[in-house]
Image (tube, helix red, strand yellow):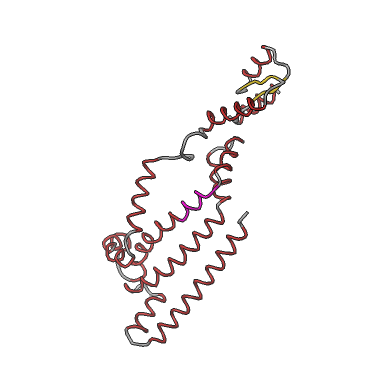
């Protein structure tokens, strides 16, 4: 046990408890010097063992404290307020407000290039909330188990958070794509092309409602296909 404890300590800080009937002082000292966190002599009381395990896990991984891995309250508060700001502005108003920024970045505020900046500012905050919700639904017990196995933050993010939230991310991505389709149609108001521009120019302005209705049907078909694909991915990754 001493050898393997020493080997474990070379690659991980996972808690180690020795349980042995050889409870003389020399063995206890050897265990602690090799990296053990505690030494429990046999026979032992199960309640005492569980209490010691929980205490070591709390000290090692701060399970008893609120918060998440790599938590940075200041950065979160700043991003949270920015996301709320852009989510509260209707897209058609956002198109007008971002005209100077669109001109600065894209060189124009009309056409397809002029619509890119407002579409990014309109979709990114919405998508951010969807991803936040999906990650928040991951069972905290899984994260605690990963930490107890000695996984670092990067492994927990990619092997636990992202892997376990694929279904939620798929649903959020589906909703965002459908929202983007609607925003793209509205972007036709500034000549961004697409179905929105087609419906406005040839349907509304020329008083041809059949073209407008056809555009609506096409949009419904596109949204339905996107939703079916999203539902399939979410279902395949739901445990």
Residue 177: percent from left, percent from top: 47, 65
Residue at image point 53% right, 41% down: 154
Residue pushed farthest right?
21
Residue at image point 62% right, 22% down: 38
Residue at image point 41% right, 75% down: 194
Magenta stretch encompasses residue 102: no
Q: Is residue 74 above or below residue 174?
A: above
Q: Between 65 and 211, which is closer to the camera in this rendering?
A: 65
Residue at image point 54% right, 71% down: 225
Q: Is residue 175 left or right of residue 164?
A: left
Residue 73 lies in what quarter of the image? top left
Q: Quadrant of the N terminus?
A: top right
Q: Is residue 91 above or below residue 218?
A: above
Residue 22: percent from left, percent from top: 73, 16
Total residue callouts: 0
Q: Between 118 and 81, which is closer to the camera in this rendering?
A: 81
Residue 185 lies in what quarter of the image? bottom left
Q: Is residue 104 left or right of residue 211?
A: left
Q: Between 86 and 121, which is closer to the camera in this rendering?
A: 86
The stretch in magenta equals: 130-138
Q: Is residue 163 left or right of residue 105?
A: right
Q: Quadrant of the C terminus?
A: bottom right
Residue 89: percent from left, percent from top: 31, 61
Residue pushed farthest top?
25
Q: Main secondary structure of the magenta part?
A: helix
Residue 19: percent from left, percent from top: 69, 23
């Amino acid at each position: 046990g001493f050898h393997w404890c020493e080997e474990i300590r070379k690659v991980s800080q996972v808690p180690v408890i020795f349980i042995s009937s050889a409870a003389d002082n020399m063995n206890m000292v050897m265990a602690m010097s090799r990296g053990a966190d505690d030494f429990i002599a046999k026979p032992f009381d199960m309640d005492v063992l569980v209490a010691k395990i929980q205490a070591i896990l709390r000290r090692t991984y701060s399970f008893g404290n609120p918060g998440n891995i790599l938590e940075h309250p200041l950065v979160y508060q700043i991003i949270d307020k920015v996301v709320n700001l852009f989510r509260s502005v209707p897209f058609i108003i956002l198109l007008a407000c971002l005209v100077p920024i669109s001109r600065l970045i894209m060189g124009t505020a009309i056409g397809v290039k002029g619509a890119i900046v407002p579409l990014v500012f309109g979709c990114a905050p919405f998508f951010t909330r969807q991803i936040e919700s999906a990650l928040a639904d991951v069972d905290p017990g899984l994260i605690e188990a990963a930490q107890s196995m000695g996984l670092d933050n990067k492994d927990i993010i990619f092997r636990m958070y992202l892997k376990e939230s694929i279904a939620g991310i798929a649903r959020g991505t589906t909703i965002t794509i459908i929202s983007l389709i609607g925003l793209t149609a509205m972007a036709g108001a500034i000549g961004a092309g697409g179905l929105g521009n087609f419906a406005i120019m040839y349907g509304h302005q020329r008083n041809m409602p059949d073209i407008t209705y056809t555009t609506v049907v096409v949009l419904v078909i596109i949204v339905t296909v996107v939703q079916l694909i999203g539902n399939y991915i979410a279902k395949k990754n739901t445990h």
